[in-house]
């Protein structure tokens, strides 16, 4: 498998996330489903037990940034910090859709080549 550059979004959550997320969880999961259905999100899950953060793997940085802007968890103040970094996949199962050309290639710096 040739290396493939994706985008890794990591979230840090508020300490009492388990108690505070319920009113926003359905919207958060619906957003995850919409990005996954569109082929823009490949993996998503919470980290820690109880959840202290989340990690999501997107097709590109633009998708990750759009997700952050639309996520009910962020709007509700449940995300205390987030990062978006290049994620170089060098091994593992092929990700559906990655054999198709990208509309906006991602540069080595993690930003789109169009700006």
Image: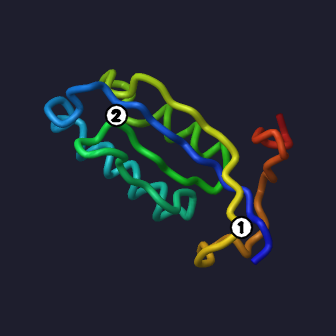
Q: Residue at x 50, y 40 (%)?
A: 10
The location of residue 22, given as percent across then percent down, is 16, 38
On screen, 21 above or below 1?
Answer: above
Question: Left or right: 113 with respect to 8?
Answer: right
Q: Residue at x 31, y 50 (%)?
A: 29
- Residue 72 is marked as 2
Residue 114 in which image quadrant: top right
Residue 84 in which image quadrant: top right
Question: Left or right: 19 with respect to 80?
Answer: left
On screen, 109 above or below 74?
Answer: below
The location of residue 87, given as percent across then percent down, is 67, 52
Question: Left or right: 18 with respect to 35?
Answer: left
Q: CA distance from mark 1 to mark 2?
A: 32 Å
> Nearer the viewer's eye, disc 1 or disc 2?
1
Q: Which quadrant: the N terminus?
A: bottom right
Dot 1 or dot 2: first in sequence order is 2
Which residue is tagged 1? 90
Q: Which quadrant: the C terminus?
A: top right
* Along the viewing direction, whichever of 114 and 94 lies nearer the viewer: 94
Q: Residue at x 55, y 64 (%)?
A: 39
The kind of secondary structure element at disc 2 is helix
Q: Residue at x 32, y 36 (%)?
A: 52
The location of residue 18, given as percent across then percent down, is 18, 36
The kind of secondary structure element at disc 1 is loop
């Amino acid at each position: 498998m040739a290396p493939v550059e994706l985008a890794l979004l990591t979230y840090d959550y508020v300490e009492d996330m388990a108690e505070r997320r319920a009113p926003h969880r359905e919207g958060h999961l619906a957003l995850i489903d919409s990005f996954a259905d569109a082929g823009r999100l490949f993996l998503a899950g919470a980290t820690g037990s109880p959840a202290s953060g989340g990690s999501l793997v997107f097709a590109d940085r633009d998708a990750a940034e759009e997700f952050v802007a639309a996520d009910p968890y962020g709007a509700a103040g449940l995300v205390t910090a987030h990062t978006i970094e290049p994620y170089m996949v060098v091994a593992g199962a092929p990700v559906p859709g990655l054999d198709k050309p990208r509309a906006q290639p991602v540069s080595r710096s993690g930003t789109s080549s169009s700006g």
